[in-house]
Every structure is written in structure tokens, then in C-alpha cells.
Image: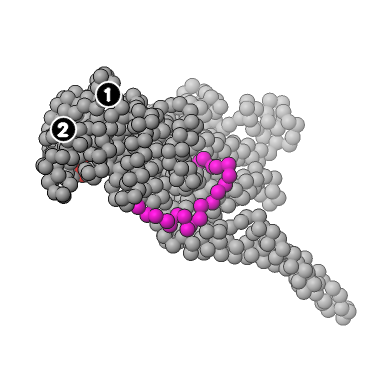
Amino acid sequence: MRGLDPQAALKDMLLAGLVALGLFAPLVGLRTDVAPTGALFIRTRWTDVAIIVGLVMAGRLAMHIFLARREARAAMADLSKPGRFATQAAWLARILGPVLLGVALLLPAIPGVGRYELDLGILVLTYIMLGWGLNIVVGLAGLLDLGYVAFYAVGAYSYALLAQYFGFSFWLCLPLAGILSAFWGILLGFPVLRLRGDYLAIVTLAFGEIIRIVLLNWVSLTGGSNGISGIPRPSFFGLPFSMEGGPGTFAGFFGIEPSPVHRVIFLYYLILALAMLTNWVSVRLRRQPLGRAWEAMREDEIACRSLGINIRNTKLSAFMIGAMFGGFAGAFFATRQGFISPESFTFIESAIILAIVVLGGLGSQIGVAIAAIVMIGGFELFRDLEEWRMLVFGAAMVLIMVWRPRGLVGSRQPTVVLRERRRIGSEHVAEGRG
Amino acid sequence: MTMLHLDNVTAGYGAVQALKGVTIEVHPGEIVTLIGANGAGKSTLLMTLCGDPRARSGRISFEGRDITQMPTHEIMQLGLAQAPEGRRIFPRMTVRENLLIGAQVAGHDPGPELERVFAIFPRLHERQAQRGGTLSGGEQQMLAIGRALMSRPRLLLLDEPSLGLAPLIVRMIFDTIRRLNAEEGLTVLLVEQNANQALRLAHRGYVLVTGQITMAGTGAELLARPEVREAYLGGH
Ligand SMILES: Nc1ncnc2c1ncn2[C@@H]1O[C@H](COP(=O)(O)OP(=O)(O)OP(=O)(O)O)[C@@H](O)[C@H]1O
Ligand SMILES: [Mg+2]
């Protein structure tokens, strides 16, 4: 099997771009027009040329990916084999990851990106973070959790209540929200230790609903369906964002003009940092014995037991760490909204997060990010369609599952890579089946 | 001193009584085989001494320590390891990752063990970056045994390693077991349907029939018994 060679593909793409530039610069870029005076003059259309060259390059790249995929598929006639998209996924992870991160880091500085785009970015990043958190439970440990939103809610209410009753600051509450959610993760974990598959799904679903219903009915503490408002907004490490711009504020301290965008930008980077922390921890853990035990447990619980892996601790730790990140995201959600109510934590949220993980390819970090961008961005794009967007969304899900049954990036990356990157040929793979 | 001692052990699943008072002994440095028909309770015996399912009565001890009620993961830390029936390798993880998981219970640096397993099964070294599920049946069995060896056990439990393998591969695997036993003094409890080869390999053997031991003796003795030849060797 010869997969996509990213370097060759990029080189070829640039070459195609150069050829296109050579051809279309004179053909399209320069055009003679008749001026009102009747004289001929040359009008330049460099934007059009740029668009055409861009299209040619994109098309060329798409062609490479398509051909590499077809070749890979032909080489591996046995479709049941995993790793069918391995080369492509590796390529995606190597190129797309850094590119996406770069775009994310520079987003507030990109011209034309205003408050609306940043708010959308914050929303997408929140779901990416939730997706990565749930991915630990579902993608790595293989525990189907339909009530993940419960931990998001616990995190949000932890912050809101701690701030309201004790006046704790966001920076103090953030770790506390994580710890409390982790605690609830363990609490959920204990009763479901012996459950698998569908049974586990039902109990976690119920757990999510129980948390929401408790929040709804414990009016004296949570305000019930009225929710909690006036949740303190985050400060820039102690410097509040304020329109007055006094000496103790963010704008005053840095000597800049106060603007409401500052807080949005700060929130944006905050969630970006939290999401990257989630990613970093997941990636690190996967290389550690704990993460390896999660994956092994997903593959075969009985084998794990016969190898002396403590299934109870492995499961509880997956629930705990997954829940902790849900809690962080919840605290962030509360401080960003300034208002929370049980309505924000319904089952549909769990379903969306789970859909992101499944569409992303169960266990793939970059897949989850792409799925979140596509789904949350898609929701936004089709906002005008109102209820119809659920239909579009459903259709898109079906299409993706038909087109890619293993998810967008449906291939697990090995966590131990050899120094000599030897590729095993299909001729060896096919050899000697028992 | 006996290494492993099962004393009148009963075990089962719900209403099914799979072991009805089994007593066996394994001494250090021995290869002991357990033969029996399908459903006799051989796998149940191996699993019971790992604590899953738990023995309902009787006593199991390993190197003098009572492990009857010990949690499974603690039993596996004592120096025994199992290559379970049907191999049960982790299909989406690479060969190398599969092996590393085997070492996790021991808690030591897996490097030297990895070298050792690769020396025993050079095939696995070639395939270390390949996903477990794409290995051939024989390679998967090597992986299952190699994975069990990663914790450097003193007692290796093997459940039907010859299952579904070509005679040549079976011989290679049995040779490996013999070599590990002779050269490193590894004690082996081998469950087999392939009675002929198993009894030739083992120092001693037990015959299990519907949850009870009906015969015991050296490999050669059992091979010579007409009942054994009748029931397990196709009457030759
Ligand atoms: N998980 C289980 N639940 C219920 N009954 C079981 C379970 N596992 C095994 N049994 C029953 O226990 C008995 C012994 O099964 P066991 O797997 O130990 O047999 P075995 O000797 O290993 O057979 P084989 O050679 O076919 O592997 C059988 O009657 C079987 O049906
Ligand atoms: Mg069996």
C-alpha cells in the first residue's frame, strides 16, 4: 500500500499552482476593455486570477487525497481491517492539527473577525473541549456515556453557587468545579462498574436526567427553572474588564481604550487554553499505562482482567477524568453566560457531544475537533432554517455514517511509534491466516 | 513445596456447577497439562484460580499463599500470568502496545522484557507496529503468550494455545513452551484438547471430565492408558 506522501503532494500542488498562474495571469488577469472615451485600455483582474489559482491548487490536492485513498482501498481488499485510513489520518493529524491550532491562535487578529465570529469560536471551542473530555470516556475507555452533560451542569452550578454564596473568584472556582465534577464522575462510576453497552448507556442517561431534575426542583438552592443570574464574569487574573477604564481595570492597567471586545477575546483564549489542556492531558495519558489500560479495556475487558489490570480503578479513573474536563467546561460556560438554568443541560446537549465524538471517529483528537467545527458551525450556518436544521443535521449524520462508518478520522493512531518507521506491506499482512 | 495447589475447589456460573471439587497440584519447574472434552471445565479452572469466577468452596494457594478470595488484579501481581482461551489480544492496538499492557501489572520497566519476548518470538519483533487484529492466527497466539510473559511470571497458564492452528505452528509453539521450561525453569499449566501432543510435552497430566478429575499421572502413563487413548486420542 502506498499512501499519500504529504511532501510530494504539496510540491505537486505548488507546481500546479505555478502552471495555473502562468496560464491564467495573461488569459484572465489582463483584459482589454473599451473605455467610455472609446479608447482601449487594459483592466487587471488579479483577484480572479488568485481565486482560479487557489481553486486549481485545492483541486489538485483533493485529487491526490482521492487517489491515495482509492489506492489504499484497492490494496487492502479486506475492508474489515482497521487502519484503512491510517496513512490519511496520520497525514491529517500531522498537517491539519498545527494548521487548525495556528488559525485558532490568530483568529482574533484576523481582519473581519468581530464579536460574532469570536462568540462562535468560543462556542465551537467549548464543544471541542467537551468532545475531548467525553472522548476519554467513550472513545478511549469504550464506556458509552449518554449523560455527560451532567458533569457540565455540575461544573457550571459549582461555580455559580460558590461565587454566589461564598464570593469565590473564577480562578479559585475553576479547579473546584473540576474536582466536584470528578467526584460526581466517581459517584456515577461505582453503580455502573458491572454494566456494559446498552445497560451502561441507559443508566448514564438516567444520571444526566437526575442531575438536571434535581437542579430544577431544588429551588431554594439553585433557583429552579429561574436559574442563577448575575454570575461574576472572569477577571484578567484580578483585573476586571470594565468600560470605565479606571486604574484597577484591564484597560486601565495596560493603558488601552476600554472595549467590550477585550473580554470576548479573553474568554476566547481562556477556552482555547482549557481545550488545549484537555487535549494535552488526553494525548499524554494515552501514552501512559493508565491510558493504555483504558484502550485495552475498550478492546477486551476479560483479557484485561487476565492480565491483572484493575478494571474498577481503570473505569473509575476514566469517568473521573472525563467528568473533570466537563466540569471545567461548565465553569467556563457559567462565567461566559453570566446566567445558567437547567434548560442549558438537557439530554440534547449530551447527544450533540456524543455525536461529535462518534462522528470524529471515536478516539481521534483531530477528528473530534473537525466534527465539532462542522457540527456547531453547521448549526450556525443553517440558523435561518430553524427546525429544518435538525433535519439537515440528521441527514448529514446519516451521510457521514454511510460514507465513513468509522467516523471522520476513523483510525486509531498507535501511541508507540518505532524509530525506523517501517511500513508493513499488504503482501505480508495477507499472509498466513492461521 | 507445591507452587499451585487447588484443594477440592468448586466453581460455576449461576445454576451451572462447572467444577465439582477439583484437587490438583503444580510443582515448580513442571509442565502440567489438563486435558478434557469440550465443556469439561478446563477454562473455568484456569479462570477460577485467577479469581474470576470465584471459587464457591475449597482452597486455592499459590506459593504457599491463600489466594482463594484475593481480587483478580492482586492475584496476577503474585507472579502468574494467563494466555486466555481464544487469545483475546487487543485487535486495534499494535503488537508492541499489546505487549506493553502485559507488563503493566508487574510495574517494572518493560524494556528488557520486550527484548526477551522479541527474542523468543522474532515474528513479533517484525510485526511490532502492526495492529493485533491483522496478525495471522499463529502470530496472534504468539502475541497472547508473549503478552503473558511480559510480566515475567513464574507460573504460566495457557488455555488451548493450539486452537485452530496448523500442525507446524502448533509444534513451534509447543517447542517454545518446552524451551522456556527447560532453559528458564518456567512452570506451565497447559490446558489442551490436543491430548497427544500435550501429554508428550508435559511432565504430568490430569484428565478432567464434567468438572471432576478422573485420572492423573505422568504424561507417558496417561498416554499409555487405554481409557485416555479411547476418549482423547481417537482410539489409536
Ligand atoms: N460465562 C459462563 N456462563 C455460564 N456458563 C458458563 C460460562 N462459561 C462456561 N460455562 C459453562 O461451564 C462449563 C465449563 O465450561 P468451560 O469453558 O470451562 O469448558 P472447557 O473445558 O474449557 O471447554 P472447551 O474445551 O470447549 O474450551 C460448560 O458447561 C459451560 O457451558
Ligand atoms: Mg475452554
Q: Residue at x 69, y 48 (%)?
A: A110
CA gap, disc 2 to disc 1? 17 Å
Magenta region's main secondary structure? loop
Please tell me the numbered disc located at residue B3: 1
| Chain of residue at mark 1 | B
Q: Position of residue B195 (x, y in %)?
A: 21, 43
Instruction: Categorize mark 2 by other alpha carbons within 10 Å: few (<14), some (14-19), many (20+).
Output: some
Give the vertical position of A24 relative to A168 (above or below): below
Q: Position of residue A260 (x, y in %)?
A: 65, 39
Q: Tell me, yes or no, whether dots 2 and 1 are on the same chain.
A: yes
Mark 1 CB in 8 Å range of ligand 1?
A: no
The amino acid at mark 2 is: Ala
* Magenta stretch bounds: A415-434
Q: Between residue B67 and residue A199, name the one nearer to us.
A: B67
| Chain of residue at mark 2 | B
**Helix, strand or loop status at disc 2:** strand
**Helix, strand or loop status at disc 1:** loop
Q: Determine if the magenta segment contains residue A302.
A: no
Q: Between residue A357 and residue B100, name the one nearer to us.
A: B100
Q: Determine if the magenta segment contains residue A432.
A: yes
Judged from the image, the quadrant occupied by ligand 1 is top left
Q: Residue at x 82, y 77 (%)?
A: A33
Dot 2 and dot 1 residues touching (CB under 8 Å): no
The amino acid at mark 1 is: Met
Nearer mark to the viewer, of 2 and 1: 2
Please tell me the numbered disc located at residue B216: 2
Q: Residue at x 43, y 50 (%)?
A: A358
Q: Residue at x 63, y 48 (%)?
A: A99
Q: Residue A253, can we see it?
A: yes
Give the vertical position of A381 relative to A123 (above or below): below
Q: Residue A214, can we see it?
A: no
